[in-house]
Image (spheres, rainbow, N blue to C red):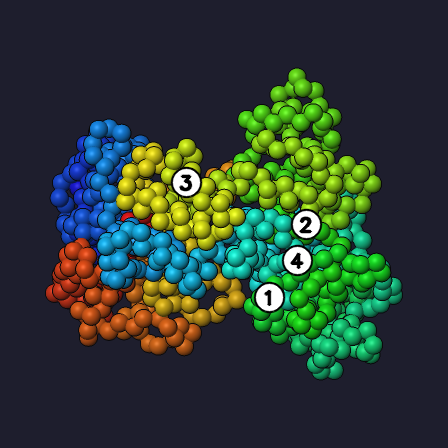
Amino acid sequence: MTSYQRNAKRQAAAQGGTAPGSIVGSTLQVLWGDADNARGAAAGSCGLSRDSGGLSSGVRLARVAGMNRTRSVTRAAFGVALVAAAAAWAGCGNDTAGPGDDDGTPFVPDPPAVYVAKVKNVLVGLPPSDDEIAKVAADPGQLGGLIDGWMQLPQYQQKMMVFFELAFQQTQINATDFVDIVPPQGLGNGRAIPLLVQNTRESFARTVLELTRQGRPLTEAFTTKQLMMTPALMELYAFLDARQINDAAQVTDLFAKASPGMKIVMETAQGPIPLADSVNPASPNYMHWYTPDLTALTYPDPTCSGLDPISFNVNSQALHALLYGEIPNHPGPNGNCPNRVGSAMSAQVAATDFTAWKLVTIRAPRAGEAHTAFYDLPALRAGTELVLATPRPGFFSTPAFFANWPTNSSNQMRVTVNQALIVATGAAIDGTDSTAPTTTPGLDAAHADPATACFGCHQQLDPTRSILSSTYSWFYYPQTDAALIKQPGLFAFQGVIAPMTTIDDFARLLASHPRVGPAWAQKLCYYVNSAPCKADDPEFMRVVDAFTASGGSWTTLVRELLASPITTAASKTATGVANGAVVAVSRRDHLCAALNNRLGFVDVCGLDTTLAGRGAALAAIAQIVSGMPSDGYGRGSIAPVLPNQPTLFYRAGLENVCAQVAALTIDAKPNPNQPGAVAWSSAQPDAAIGEFVATVMALTASDPRAAQATSILSSHFQAAIQAGQTATDSLRSTFVAACLSPSFIGIGM
């Protein structure tokens, strides 16, 4: 009995009936196959029988999809069958040893039909074509050229943006995380704030994509002072420059300081005010803002309700919040009237302020030059430059990075510098580095004794982080403590010891560090193969050398690693021997990209907040995928967090996603918000099933597995019809079976 059968029977017993989705389950067993015969002995040792059960069709499809590999397979995620088996296999472990390792059995390479599909899916989320597989079958060297072509597709940009967000640690944040660096209210409560947070997550990844598009080295991302920004994000950077906070949490509001006695006014009844007037000091409507909401607002204190106009003392944080739709705190007849979340119409920012991306240069002000006015939205929309006092070089000074890694008077930038080192060099200060500087400026007195256990780390950590504490306050604003400013520290890490006088020196030392090449090749290895490359693998070292020789060309690294047998398993490598053939679950971003790109959806998973409000069906998918595993990173960890293992939650979520997608694509009404989505008709089941195999399962017509898969899915459709299901439901059920097949939901097949 397979693990899927056991789980289905448990569900059936709990529900007092037959196994749910018995026809789908039967097909899944065919699609998934018996997993592998070697598993039988392991199952037996755990007290699990191997009877045929009632899901006979699912076993065959795993074999069809190529599950029975001769090489060793770490079956971390074999979709439905193994996802459902997670609980049953607890304590049995994964199959990490088998034919193809150094156990005397011969290595059997993967064929082009398998590895071309893997590489294209990882890069762009699309299935291969017959022509592409034929080219590589005739000449394996053609794969590099195909990779170059795939990197020109917009789908590549979309997938790499997610990779760079994670690799540069710009994601895993929400509005609440900004309270630590913008106390006490954070970014505010306006309805448009989630869009601003998404902009902060995306900005640096878009920057790296733009730099690599221009042919500039990856390491320029460590030092750049040009960032891809929207007008809204430009506003945030300028706001953070106008409202500065020192180590003691004291706020200096530069805008308020320059505007003593000014009142900010919001009104409804007098009608709209042109934005150009609101921001123009020469206009009588300067700092007067229109909102349609005042007369409709209610408060616990009824004397606050319906006040129109309202006014309050000039305050940068309140003005910033106003721009995004908040009605800030303001005086009322009997005291303070607390802030309110206004309607979408109350926001001064426009929808395009979150989508109009452009390359913006950040520079320090010249003598006597004014800083960029954060509230001047018309100027921000037209401009490509920010004049700021706060230094913003590279990835480690972005609001997203700072929000990820807040510091304080106890930590004193140690977490910040350690995470920056992890991003740049793939290594952390962990006590294993023998680098020993002869001087230790900035060393904490509590750890200054060489006899203490902490000295080994702190002799590197404290001098290196001192450049951050001499540049920024504990809230990441310009440092004002004279003693800290005078102690810029010393870079001491992994064999490199060098003085630093400015934060730009730190950026340059990161960019030139000898560990950068291996580190970024390793990050890409994790992304592509869901496992690390073996550091001393000659093939991995060749890839790193090619990357370094290219001057740090990202496209070179992508081509070399994805065309390498480390990725394709077309020949034996030390990494392959160490890892086996890792097949991971298609984690959230891979899964959503495949659904979008193969089926013509626009953000079917609802991950882009700038595209919200597109129907209940997509909202249901968004809710499901929000709980599905996705790539991530952790504090102090040099390896990414990759939830490769199957779980019952993953299996249930995936089946529900597939069912929702089936309802959107089969006999569905046209959706004006999804004009490019595929549309299949149950009146033409053969044509639809053919596309399920080619597009969803990624099995081309020349692939011998395609005919078998087509036959199995056709039998599934007919069985559903014979069981009394409608043609629509039968075809949707057939789609779900294809959607749950290993070649779709597994990364590495």
Q: Are marks 3 and 4 in contact (CB under 8 Å)?
A: no
The Cα–Cα distance between marks 1 and 3, rounded to whole angstroms, is 36 Å
Say what secondary structure mark 1 lies in.
strand
The 10 Å Cα crowd at callout 3, few under 14, some 14 to 19, many 20 or more, is some
Say what secondary structure mark 4 lies in.
loop
Type of residue at label 2?
Ile
Q: Residue at x 57, y 63 (%)?
A: 195
Q: Position of residue 265 (x, y in %)?
A: 78, 72
Q: Give the residue pinned by disc 1.
A: 358
Q: Are marks 1 and 4 in contact (CB under 8 Å)?
A: no
The Cα–Cα distance between marks 1 and 4, rounded to whole angstroms, is 22 Å
504 or 72, which lies in front? Answer: 504
Type of residue at label 3?
Arg
Q: Earlier in the sequence, mark 1 or mark 4?
A: 4
Q: Earlier in the sequence, mark 3 or mark 4?
A: 4
Say what secondary structure mark 2 lies in.
loop
Foreground tag (3 vs 4): 3
The Cα–Cα distance between marks 2 and 4, rounded to whole angstroms, is 9 Å
Q: Give the residue pinned by disc 2.
A: 181
Q: Residue at x 15, y 59 (%)?
A: 707
Foreground tag (1 vs 3): 3
Q: Give the residue pinned by disc 4.
A: 187
Q: Give the residue pinned by disc 3.
A: 542
Q: Earlier in the sequence, mark 2 or mark 4?
A: 2
Q: Position of residue 4 (x, y in %)?
A: 23, 46
42 versus 241 height, above or below:
above
Say what secondary structure mark 3 lies in.
helix
Name of the residue lying farthest toward the top: 451
Indicate left or right for 569 with 171 as reference: left
Type of residue at label 4?
Leu
Quadrant housing residue 247: top right
